Structure formats: structure tokens, C-alpha cells
Image: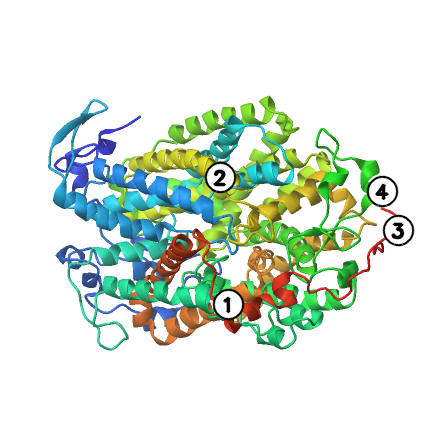
Amino acid sequence: MLGNEDRLSDGKQDESNEPSDWEQPNIRSHPNDEEGEEHERLLDPNFPNEDDIELHELEPGRAVSFDSEAAAKANEEDSPYEEVRAAVRNFDEDLPCNTIRAWTIGLSLTLFGAALNTLFSMRAPSIGIGSLIAQIIAWVAGRAWERFVPDKQITLFGRTCSLNPGPFNIKEQSIIVVMANVSFSVAYATDIILAQLVFYKQNFGILFQLLIVISTQSLGYGIAGIMRKFLVYPASMIWPSTLVSIALINAMYETHHVKDPTIIGGNMSRYRWFGLLTIVSCAYYFIPGYFAQFLSVTAIATWLAPQNAVVNQLFGGNTGLSLIPITFDWTQVAGYIGSPLIVPWHAIANTLLGLVIFFIGSASFLHYTGAWYSQYLPMSDASTYDNTGARYNVSRILTPEFTFDEQAYKSYSPLFISTTFALSYGLSFASITALIAHTFLYYSGNIWAQFQNSTVEKPDIHMKLMRKYKEAPSWWYTSLFLIILALSFFAVLFFPTNLQWWAFLLAVAISFTFSLPIGIVEAVTAQQIGLNVLTEFIYGYIQPGRPLALMLFKTYGYITMSQALKFVSDLKFGHYMKIPPRTMFLAQVVATTVSCFIQVFVLNFAINNIDGICEITQPDRFTCPGSRTFFSASVIWGLIGPARVFSPGQIYSGLLFFFFLGAITPVAIYFAAKRYPRSPVKYLMAPLIFGGASSMPPATPLNYLSWGLVGYVFQYVIKKRHFRWWSRLNYLTSAGLDLGLALGTIIIFLAFTLHDIKPPQWWGNTVVTSTLDYQGKAIQVVLPPGETFGPKSW
């Protein structure tokens, strides 16, 4: 499988198949190259207008600020996208990356990151430790290795390689970042394990847990291999989420600093700016995160009327609409949604538009007109309720075989959910049909052209530079896909999951079909449309009453696609950093597999050692918010089934209208943009309007509104008025804020939470917990014991 380019390098031999591969590539090897990059995209929202191109023309010598003389000698051709130009070098360097040093540091960080993120995923709010921490640790570890480890030759797997192949370089660091990217994300299948063990009281053993985690995390590799020519190679597929890491890595390896005293921070190196911001962010988080928690959710109206249900519903930041969104906590801004400093403004605006129209405007109207018996329920949360207003007791409608007991259901209660939870399902319906229509209208021509003529596309500078490396063969991806497919079959058929073989194949087919349209949207906007509701809807109708089977169908149907796009995103990162594709493949696969074992171990350790885990009242906030939402969805779609919830005549049947709304909206936008090409209509994206706020619940309007406000300041105002600052420091500012928050969270957890040291008991902390919003009790009508609401029969 391995070519010479992917052997463990000794630092003296190159990683390509032939020595000549390291020579400057022929960047005009195709006749169409002279025509430039892909300027012909229809209504590409990221492609700047002519005025913007002229306004944002990069000053002479800009590339020099990235690195040494190599940058100055680089070809002047660059990406047509200013976001890419601001972060990515337009040249390549001949550096080894497939080294023992990179693998050792990368796998060590894989163990560290996978363990901590699995633990933190069970906290509320759920805080992830991203690859930024891996970058910092890798840089320090790499420099230490370079200095202290002797340069000895060893034999590994029949190959001779060096323990210390010279200076730690930018490509080694990039490989480590790739390992972190694929291993730091917590497997979606861990929610299945938590739902089984904590909520359904099932336990199939460690082998089943390992099989479903490994298979769901790795099945997407085959899809990623196919999607490379559609989602990696074209210049228009930007993948904004990769640019922060790239900007930070480039800042770390700057050797020639060009000062710019005209902007804030311009007199210091970009890496120093990042370091100072990280320290400030880390120190500051102790204030809203521990000493003065009222700064996290500054819902002043709820403090003035802590027991008024309507006030808490409208202004609360936990279970309310947060009509006055005030927070001084980066966790609230970026914790659920990610940093707003990397998402293009047009994507933020589309998301906010959908949020205001549906989750604030429509939710308020529906809730206060009594739709869906809303007066007896919270405005916004992710739980399920019965007709007394209590949490839905799933055990009352389960048979001993963990299937649906219809008679018990009829004697108990129909299922009720909060207003925003119900709307989130309707918007999920709309986002799927909008996605299909949007992709057909805007991208069908380009997709077909790629199928017909992918070998003579007009490449950008980065595609041209990557030609000197041998591509990872498609059969590598196909072989891995078949192996994982076999493991998946064993997991779902050998154990009593109630998932049929044909249903499993249907789930995989759904993932494959939607990977391309969803990938296009994510590559342009950094926002991913989820398939979770679609898979739940389909399986809930074809085989209702099987909650575990539904969770598996949902995971294979949704996460296979999501993982495929994560792998594609990393491939784009490697594309930008000029990493040999075969080395990329190995780094991704090995790190993913190792992380699966670590996550299963940590999950079981937490369940067995943290008291009250996944309970709402868990004192250290290990309430499992994601798993609770996952469990609620399994009840709605798997146990009770959508036919008893959404079909005509049922409580939430009106939400099916959103399928139609989602289908017609892209058509209306498309023709309006053609009719008025210079109007803001051209920036509207129906899939984002409907699906941009898909994290609600458990995310709240406070999270999205604060995220949108910060995004507006940085991605519109600063980018438009202070472009020199934005192009130099925007992505590093995002990285510093994220890393500082992660470090502050870890320190608080290790220093206080683990030792049961409570925050100071003063007004700034106690006022928060005294409100109905915080307690989850902001309900207009609380029934006395013995009374019920809702329909008389169901």
C-alpha cells in the first residue's frame, strides 16, 4: 500500500516517489489553466465583487510576512478568495512530514484529546477541546524533541529512519493537527451507549460498544474518497473552518516579521498576538465561569421577576427566547455553534434570519396562542413531557423486550415537546427539501461537469502545487469501506438491535446520497445541514417501536455522512498545507481507530465513577445534554414513532407543511436573484435559513444571537472597514479566544470541580439559580396533582 513518498522519513530523503518530484511543478500543465480559477460560479456568495477585489488587493510583499525568502520567491498567482489568501500560503516547501516524531506526538495527543473531550461532552454546556490545543502542545513537543532527542537511525517495520530528522517543521505539525481533527471529536455513537446504559438500562457489553463506535466513525472514509474531486479540488470549495488552524500554523513558523503600525497589534508578530490573547481569554474565563456567573447569562429581566413565567420565557437565556441577548462569556457565544470569526457573514446573516423568523417570531406566536398545548410546557428545552407536565416516563410504554407497548401507551399519555423543539423538527424537514432544491438549482451544472470532465478542470494555485504528490488510490478508500461495512453488519445483526440488514443498507445509501449537496453547503458556509431528523423520520415510519434500531439507523444514516465530510475537510486542510495525500490517509485512519478505543474506555469509566451522571441535578453539570436530546429523539421517532406524532390528526401534524415550504423557498430565491442580480437576495440560502440554527435545542437563542452579533462585528464591519487587520489577525483572534476558553475550562475543572470546591456564594452567583429560567420551570400553567391536559384519546 505504501509508496516511497509515505515511508518514515529520515529527514534526508524526500517523501515523493522520485527525487524529481520535489522540483517546482509545472503549474501550466493543462491548456485551460491560463483561463484562471473558477470565476464562472453562479451566485457564489464567497466570491468577491469586482469592487471588493480592487479594495482588498493585497499590498506588495504580503507573502513575506508569512515566512522567509521562500515566500517572496513564490509564484504571484494566488487564490481568488480573500479568506483563503488571508490564511494560506501560495507556495510549497520540500519538507518531510511522515516522521517518527510526527507520529509519536500525534498519537500521544490523540490519546489526550479523545479522553478529555469524551469526558467534557457530558457537561452542560458541552465544551470541546479543539485541535488548537494540539497545535500548541505539538509545537512545544516538537521543538523539545528537536533539541533533546538524539539523531539515531532505527529500523521500524523493515525501514530505516531517524529519531530526530532535523528541525521540527510546518508539515509535521500539520500531520499532527490532522490526527487531532479526526480524533478529538466525540463519536456520535457514544450517545447510543449512554442512552442504552443510563436511560434504557440496556447493556450489550464492551464488544458491541467498540464495534458501533469504530464502524460509525470510519464508514465515511469510502465516501470521502469519492467526493475528493467535487469537494476538495475545486477552488470554490473553501472550507472556512480549516482556515483558523492554517493561520495559526503559519504564524508559528514566521521567520520574517513585517510590522504594520497602522493596525492594532501590527507591531508584534502574529504568534505573539495569539499568545497574549490566549492568556487574556484564559484568565478572563474565571470571572463568568466561576466567580461571577451572572456574566454568563445576563438576563436582567429574569432577575427582576424570577418567578414570573412569561418574563422568564421571553428574556431567559437557558430555556427562554433571550430577547435581550447579553452575555460576557465566550462559552455562550461559541460553545454550541463554534467561533463566529470563521463563518462568512452571509452565512451568519442567513442563520440569524431563520432564527428571528422561526425561533423568535413564530415560536412566540405559537406559544402564546396555545398551539400544541404550549401553556403547559416550557418555551424551549430538549426534554419530552407527558400530559401532566412531568418528564415522559419511557419505562411505562416499554415491553420487556424493549419494544413499544401500545396498550400501555394508550393508558398513559401522548408525547409533548417544547415549542422550539417542535419548530426545530419542522425546520429540519424544510432544510432537507430546501437542500435538494438549492443544490439542483445552483450546482447541478458544475456537478455534472465534474463527472464528465474532472481531469481538465481549471485548477487554482493550490491544486497545481499538489500535482507533484501521488494521490491516495481510490481502492484504498474502497477497501477500508468494505472492511468497516462488514464490521457494521456484524454489530447490528449479531446483537439484538432489532435493525434489519436492508434497513442498515438504506441508512448507508442515505448518507452517500446527501454527502455531496450537504458538503457543498458546508464548504461554502462552514455550516452543516444534519440528516438526523430525516433518518429518524424515515425509519420511524418503516419500522416503528424499535428505539435502539432507530438510534443505529440514525447514526449510520447521519454520522456516516458527517464523518465523510469531516474527512473531506481535513483533506482540504492537507491540500492547503501541501501534505502528501497518502500520508494524509494513514494519519486519518490510524488516529480515528485509536481514538475510538479511548472514547469507549473513558465513557465507561465516567458512567461507573461519576455519581448522578446524566441527571438534571448533577452538581458538577455532567447532565449529558447531547445524550438527553438523543434519548428524547429515540422516544419520539423510535419508540412511539412519527405516525403517532406527526401524521394527519396527530398533535404535531402541521409540521409536515415545512417539507413543502422548504422545497419552494429556494426556487423563489433563485428567480428573485436572477431578476434582481445586484440585490441582497443573491446572498439568501434557503438551507441555511431553515437549518442554520439546527443546534436548537439544546442551544438557545442567546447562543445564536450573541454568536451573530460578534460575527457581524468581525466578519462584516471589521472585514469591510479594517481589512488589513482582518486579513492579518482575525483567524488568530478566533484561535486565541477558543484556546483560552478551553484552557480556562480545564483549569477550573481540575482545580475546583474535581475537588468539589463550589463557586463563591454571593449575589452574582445565586441570582442566576433563583430564576424559573435556570430551573427549567418557566411554565404558564402548572396543573395540580391528578389533572391532565391534551387530547382525550390518542
Residue to which mark 1 is pinned = 761
**Separation (CA) of disc 1 from disc 3:** 47 Å
- Neighbour class for label 4 at 10 Å: few (<14), some, many (≥20)? few
Residue at left offset 34%, top offset 48%:
573
Residue to which mark 3 is pinned = 792
The answer to the question of whether label 2 and label 3 lie on touching residues, with beta carbons closer than 8 A, is: no
Along the viewing direction, whichever of 359 and 357 lies nearer the viewer? 359
Query: In the image, what residue type sits under mark 4?
Result: Ser
Q: Position of residue 495 (x, y in %)?
A: 60, 24
Query: In the image, what residue type sits under mark 3?
Result: Lys
- Neighbour class for label 1 at 10 Å: few (<14), some, many (≥20)? few
Nearer to us: label 4 or label 1 = 1
Q: Which mark is residue 411?
A: 4
Q: Position of residue 592 (x, y in %)?
A: 40, 37
Residue 253, placed above or below residue 722: above
**Separation (CA) of disc 2 from disc 3:** 42 Å
Q: Secondary structure at mark 3?
A: loop
Residue to which mark 2 is pinned = 603
Q: Earlier in the sequence, mark 4 or mark 2?
A: 4
Q: Earlier in the sequence, mark 2 or mark 3?
A: 2
**Separation (CA) of disc 1 from disc 2:** 32 Å
Residue at left offset 48%, top offset 52%:
522
Query: In the image, what residue type sits under mark 1?
Result: Gln
- Neighbour class for label 3 at 10 Å: few (<14), some, many (≥20)? few
